[in-house]
Image (spheres, helix red, strand yellow):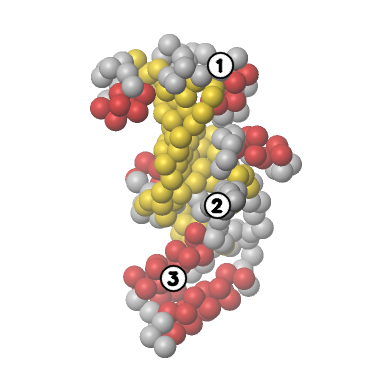
């Protein structure tokens, strides 16, 4: 019974959200906490559940907004495919904003990730993926400059470095991804228009060519609720 007050709070929040229109701003956090008779810390904890489901979205300095009907991008993790490919398969529209392509030099993390010497010239591609004008993912790909120069991406680039390399004829073979849940760092939170520390699904991915060379070292941040990733696995012994 110890969780009953918290469950009641979540039920009250669920009712408030369900009776609000998409895009409607919820009362401020202090006001809502007073109305519901809870502390702001307890309110924030309860609201994270709805944020993870994609039902509400907090914008830094603007408040918390109810999300209307949203499209969910679905994909199995057995095959690495771009968000653009996922969206086309489901007849959904995604757009790219805040595209930044720059030359950088390998720090320790990227030197190890790409198996290149420290201070090697790299190309970094950063962008925000949106659906229904909402930021849903922040993608950062870093590649050795001999694979991709900063001036090589065309004006028609739609956001997928992987698709660009495949279309160019690169022999991409395998990928390895480490998947975790993390709190949004300040730069990622700004890009996704969420609060620092909000929970995100994080993919740390290396893509290899047929020779085993690391072609891309990528960090991808997804807002839960907008994505449904799943894995089909064999049952042991069968």
Mark 1: few/some/many CA within 10 Å (<14, 14-19, 20+): some
The secondary structure type at the circle numbered 2 is: loop
Q: Is residue 186 left or right of residue 69?
A: left
For marks 1 and 3, give the one nearer the viewer: 1
Q: Residue at x 46, y 35 (%)?
A: 176
> Residue 127, can we see it?
yes
| Dot placed on the residue nearer the N-terminal end, 3 or 2 | 3
The secondary structure type at the circle numbered 1 is: loop
The residue to which callout 3 is attached is: 46
Q: 30 above or below 4?
A: above
The residue to which callout 1 is attached is: 170
Q: Is residue 134 left or right of residue 104?
A: right
Picture quadrant where residue 22 is located? bottom right
The residue to which callout 2 is attached is: 237
Residue 179 location, x and y as percent? 43, 45
Q: Residue at x 42, y 88 (%)?
A: 1
- Contact? badges 3 and 2 (CB < 8 Å): no
| Dot placed on the residue nearer the N-terminal end, 1 or 3 | 3
- Contact? badges 1 and 2 (CB < 8 Å): no
């Amino acid at each position: 019974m110890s969780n009953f007050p918290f469950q009641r709070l979540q039920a009250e929040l669920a009712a408030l959200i369900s009776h609000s229109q998409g895009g409607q701003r919820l009362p401020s956090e202090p006001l809502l906490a007073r109305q519901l008779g809870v502390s702001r810390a307890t309110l924030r904890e309860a609201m994270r559940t709805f944020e993870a489901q994609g039902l509400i979205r907090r914008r830094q300095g603007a408040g918390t907004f109810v999300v209307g009907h949203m499209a969910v991008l679905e994909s199995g993790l057995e095959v690495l495919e771009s968000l653009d490919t996922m969206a086309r398969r489901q007849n959904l529209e995604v757009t790219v904003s805040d595209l930044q392509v720059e030359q950088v030099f390998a720090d320790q993390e990227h030197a190890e990730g790409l198996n290149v010497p420290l201070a090697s010239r790299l190309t970094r591609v950063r962008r925000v993926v949106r659906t229904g004008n909402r930021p849903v993912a922040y993608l950062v790909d870093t590649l050795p400059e001999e694979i991709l120069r900063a001036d090589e991406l065309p004006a028609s680039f739609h956001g997928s470095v992987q698709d660009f390399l495949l279309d160019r004829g690169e022999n991409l073979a395998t990928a390895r991804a480490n998947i975790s849940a993390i709190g949004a760092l300040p730069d990622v939170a700004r890009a996704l228009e969420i609060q620092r520390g909000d929970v995100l699904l994080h993919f740390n991915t290396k893509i290899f060519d047929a020779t085993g060379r690391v072609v891309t070292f990528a960090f991808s941040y997804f807002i839960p609720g907008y994505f449904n990733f799943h894995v089909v696995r064999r049952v042991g012994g069968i």
